[in-house]
Amino acid sequence: MDTDREGARVPFTEPARLWSVDEANQRLDDLRELLPQLRAWVVRLRKVHDEIHRLSAFWGREVDASDHPDRALKRRLDAEWRDLSHRLEEKVDALRDEGIEVKDLESGLIDFYALRDNEVVFLCWQRGEDEVAFFHTLDGGYTTRRSLTEGRHRTPTRSHRGA
């Protein structure tokens, strides 16, 4: 079993591929470009959600009436929500199809499925790191990641929550 970013156990699914450290490092330039775009979409989704919630809380179901002055705004926000959600889901699913797991967009935490000592593990990378230098077991997580070179537990120098 794997864990999500809150530590809840989720079932393991067979990865699309296993990455070497070199292959994962080669993919980082693309991810460094993609992650800010995905984060921007999440920020916009939050704003759209808040605005839809504000309209619904103030007007209730009336906002959907054909003659309501805010109906067009709500419909535009609903459409933007659907579009952004779809695009975000598509991009994250495409990464997952490559054997790349987006663990936390806020901190830019990414895992690549890999094989280490005959065990499927995650190569672990976070925005701000120069290269993939850590790994953890599938049922571990960020706090259990270990250096690829040292092979022993190493405490990360910064937290993935506020990065």
Image (cartoon, rainbow, N blue to C red):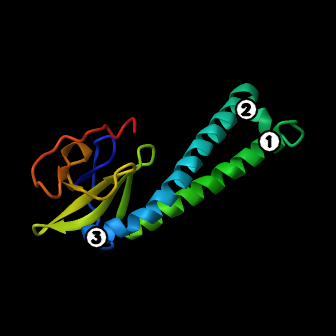
Residue 12 is drawn in which quadrant?
Answer: bottom left
Q: Is residue 85 left or right of residue 157?
A: right
Residue lying at the far front of the rendered structure: 130
| SS assignment at label 2 | helix
Residue, x 40% and y 63% (percent of image)? 28
Question: Residue 22: which disc?
Answer: 3
Q: Quick check: 59 above or below 76?
A: above
Identity, as a three-letter code, of the amino acid under mark 2? Leu
User: Could you tell me if the residues under marks 2 and 3 are in contact, i.e. CB atoms within 8 Å?
Assistant: no
Compute the Cα span from label 1 to label 2: 9 Å
| SS assignment at label 1 | helix
Compute the Cα span from label 1 to label 3: 48 Å
Residue, x 31% and y 62% (percent of image)? 112
User: Could you tell me if the residues under marks 1 and 2 are in contact, i.e. CB atoms within 8 Å?
Assistant: yes
Question: Residue 55: which disc?
Answer: 2
| Residue 99 visible in the current orientation | no
Question: Residue 73: which disc?
Answer: 1
Foreground tag (1 vs 3) = 3
